[in-house]
Amino acid sequence: MPRFDLRQDKDTFKPLAPFQVLAVMCCPHDRIRRESMMAHIQAGTGVVGPRRQPLSGKEFRSEVRLSALKGVIGGGLLLSRLQLHLNDYRFSLDRAMLLVRSLLPKWERQYGGAWPRDASLRQWPHSRRKMLQAYDGFRPVAHLWAALAYGGQYERQDIWPGSLQTLPVFLSYSEAILELAFQVPTPRREQRFALTPTEVWRFVIPQKLVESRTLQALPLSEDQLKILNNDHKSHK
C-alpha cells in the first residue's frame, strides 16, 4: 500500500488530514469510495474541488460509523493477538475473539456518540466467520483500528484520528503497534494475521509532529484477565 502524505508543508498537516486518515481506515481497498467520502468535505471547505460524487457530511459520518463495526473487529483481533503474545498467553483465535467481544461495549460508549444513531442499530460482527471476514477486509489498516481500540480500552481520548491535535498521538500508537506486529513470530496456523510492510497503509507527517513511541508490552486490563482466567477454568 502507498504512503499517504498528510503534510501541508514541512511543519504542518493538511487541514483535512484527519478526514483523509478516516477515509483510508474505512476504504483501504477502494480509492473511488475514499474520494467520494472526501468530496463533500473538500467542496464544503473549498480546499480542493470534488472529484467524485460527494457524500454529505452526515453520510461521511455514517460511512465511518458503519466501517467501524468491522474495522474495530479487525483491529481488535490484531491487538488481542499482540497482547496475548506479549503477556505470555498462548494465542488462539477463540481466546482473541473473547477479548474483542468484551472490548466492544466500552468502545461503543467511548466513541459511539460521535456518529449518527441510525448506524448504531447495526450489529457488530460476532460470529467467528464474520469476525474473520472483518479482519481480512480491513487487514491493511488493522494497526490503525487497533490503535483506536487500544485508546477505547484504556479511555485515552488523545488516541483518536478525528482531529489535528490528536492525530500525531494516534499515528504514533498505530506505528508502534505495527512494528510489534512485524516482530511477533507467526506460526503457520496464524498466517492470516501476519502483516507485511508492503501491504499496510502508512502516513507521512511533518517531522516536528512525529512522536516516537515504543510499546514493549500491551498490558491486559483487569476485565481481560478475568475473561482469560474464566476461559482457563472452563477448559480444565
Image (spheres, rainbow, N blue to C red):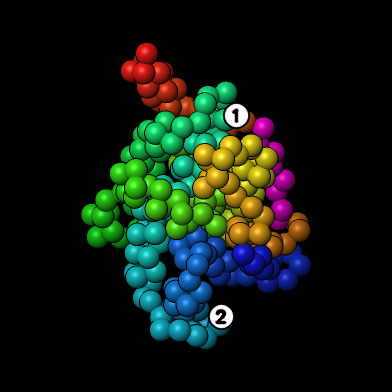
Mark 2 and mark 1: span between their CA atoms? 44 Å
Residue assigned mark 1 = 86
* Viewer can see residue 122: yes
User: Is 110 located above or below residue 70 in the figure?
Assistant: above
Number of the front mark, 2 or 1: 1
Number of numbered discs visible in the structure rendering? 2
What span is colored magenta in the figure?
Answer: 209-216
Residue assigned mark 2 = 47
Q: Is residue 25 magenta?
A: no
Q: Could you tell me residue 134's position as x and y percent?
A: 41, 53
Q: Residue at x 62, y 47 (%)?
A: 178
Q: Residue at x 60, y 58 (%)?
A: 200
Amino acid at the residue labelled 2: Val
Q: Residue at x 68, y 71 (%)?
A: 8
Q: Could you tell me residue 165's position as x and y percent?
A: 59, 55
* Viewer can see residue 169: no
Q: Could you tell me residue 79's position as x and y percent?
A: 52, 40
Image quarter of residue 88: top right
User: Is 31 located above or below residue 117 in the figure?
Assistant: below
Closer to us: 236 or 34: 236
Q: Is residue 213 magenta?
A: yes
Q: Secondary structure at mark 1?
A: helix
